[in-house]
Image (tube, helix red, strand yellow):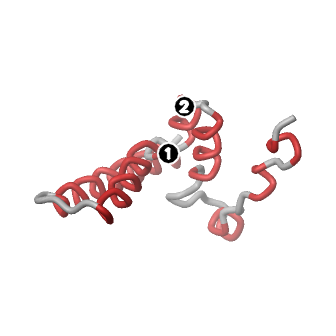
Amino acid sequence: MTFYNFINPEDFMLPCLNKQLFGIECLGCGIQRSTLFLFKGEFLLAFKIYPAIYTLFLLALFLIFNLFKKFKYDYNIKMGLIVLNVIIVVTSYLIKINH
């Protein structure tokens, strides 16, 4: 018997305040469920729910790594990853609200 059988992580997910108050999803809606599916190994479903999950994960790994190891073009890489994530998040949000 595993720890997951005793506690369901979905019971601890925070509701979207924007969706509750205004009835429309925010730019971050789906990231909690997507992260949960990522940790469960359901990679395609994680991507379908929140397409930026992998690039955000890559950005987080880079930022953590960059705390310990500095190199010449780290600022450019960080900014590139941030811009890429913003583009993916906004594009997927626009597609989601128009369908």
Q: Residue at x 76, y 50 (%)?
A: 9
Q: Gap in Å between the C-alphas at discs 2 and 1?
A: 24 Å
Give left or right: position of 95 versus 24. Answer: left
Residue 11 spot, x, y in % from top left: 81, 54
Are there few (<14), some (14-19), or many (20+) residues within 10 Å of tag 2?
some
Q: Is mark 1 on a helix, strand or loop?
A: helix
The residue wearing badge 1 is 98
User: Residue 6: where, in percent of width, then height?
Assistant: 88, 46
Would residue 90 appear left or right of 34 to someone viewing this image? left
Residue in the picture at 87% in, 34% down: 1
Which residue is pictured at 50% across the width and 58% down the height? 27
Q: Quadrant of residue 49?
A: top right
Tell me whether circle 2 and circle 1 mark residues in contact (CB < 8 Å): no
Against 88, residue 79 (above or below) is: below
Q: Decide: few, some or many residues near mark 1? Use Cα within 10 Å; few <14, some 14-19, many ≥20.
A: few
Name the residue at the front extreme.
Answer: 68
- Where residue 60 appears, x then y in whole percent? 41, 56
Per the rendering, the mark at residue 43 is 2
Residue at 59 percent across and 44 percent down: it is 34
In the rendered image, the residue lying farthest to the left is: 72
Q: Label 1 is placed on what type of residue?
A: Asn
Q: In this view, does 10 lie to the left or right of 77?
A: right
Disc number lying in front (2 or 1): 2
25 or 34: nearer the eye?
34
> How many discs mark residues in the rendered view?
2
25 or 63: nearer the eye? Answer: 63
Secondary element at tag 2: helix
Q: Which of 28 and 74 is in front in this view?
A: 74
Residue 5: assigned label: none
Which amino acid is tagged 2? Phe
